[in-house]
Amino acid sequence: MNRPFFKSVHGRTLIESHRGSIGYAPENSWSAIKHGHRLGADLIEVDVQMSQDGVPFLRHKAQLPDGRWCHQCTWETLKTVQVENEPLPRLDDILAWAREVGAYLSLDLKTRFTPEGQLAPAVIKQLARTGTKERVMLLLLDHQELLHIKKTHPDLMTRALLRGRLHNYPDYLKSIGADCVNIAYDLFRPADIEEIHAAGIAVAMGGLWNLAADIASFDIDIFSHDDPAEASRLLGYEAAAQP
């Protein structure tokens, strides 16, 4: 099994910079992405949507500041939009940059407002074209889409995003082919992590709202945080390092 994001491989929990690095710059912007990389994040997490004419780009919210739906706009329209004085980056440009600088990316696929089965193939096509499949983990709340990805592209790394605690993590995660799972800081027990790891699945944690928590004591593989520098401090590292 390919295990590039496991703590057991690196000897430490990896740091994921959330939405680029929103502790420093507008989310999903070039500034946030590059700043997260400069701070030494192991993974840069960004959100991916698709324009009406099939161009994957970065944005978390489904609507533009003026209320228009992102998926109803063509790229010709979207490329003129600025959010907090930052343009919306195209995914293919981000992938080319990641390959050039040696960055690893977590792509949160926002499939809700695009026709089923369209966003993931468009993203995977760009991964193949840019030669970045091994530098990317695909994150999905839509587990039907995740399962389809693993059936058609078993070599791709996937992470199941959750909004609750599962009754049986190992069986469920194996049934959809997830390589990694996000657990919530306030919705897990240490035994959950042990069971997930025993099934050969990596564990990521985000949404830490208690900065007094002893995050370094959690046996997680990936810690997702808005500020990579703060994440490094919380984990007891002098500085985050590249994998």
Image (cartoon, rainbow, N blue to C red):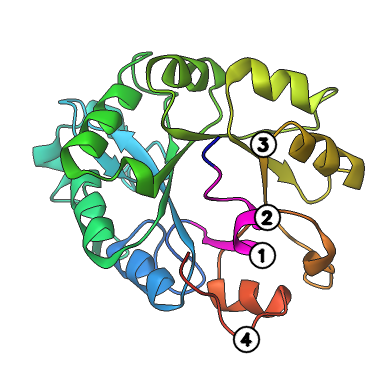
Q: Which residue is mark 3?
A: 201
Q: Which mark is residue 8?
A: 2
Magenta segment range?
3-18
Rendered residue at 81%/32% (across/down): 165
The quarter holding residue 128 reads: top left
The quarter holding residue 86 reads: bottom left
Q: Nearer the viewer, mark 4 or mark 1?
A: 1
> In x, y percent, where is residue 156?
42, 32
**SS category of the residue bearing label 1:** loop
Q: Earlier in the sequence, mark 3 or mark 1?
A: 1
Q: Which residue is mark 4?
A: 238
Q: Amino acid at mark 1?
A: Gly
Q: Earlier in the sequence, mark 2 or mark 3?
A: 2
Q: Nearer the viewer, mark 3 or mark 1?
A: 1
> Gap in Å between the C-alphas at discs 3 and 1?
16 Å
Residue 30 shown in magenta: no
> Gap in Å between the C-alphas at discs 2 and 1?
5 Å
Count of numbered badges drawn on the protein: 4
Q: Amino acid at mark 2?
A: Ser
**SS category of the residue bearing label 2:** helix
> Gap in Å between the C-alphas at discs 4 and 3?
28 Å
10 lies left or right of 27: right
> Gap in Å between the C-alphas at discs 2 and 3?
12 Å
From the viewer's side, name the closer residue of 56 and 8.
8
90 lies left or right of 110: left
> Gap in Å between the C-alphas at discs 4 and 1?
15 Å
Q: Badge 1: few (under 14), some or many (20 or more) residues near its Cα, within 10 Å? A: few
Q: Which residue is mark 1?
A: 11
- Quadrant in which the N terminus is drawn: top right
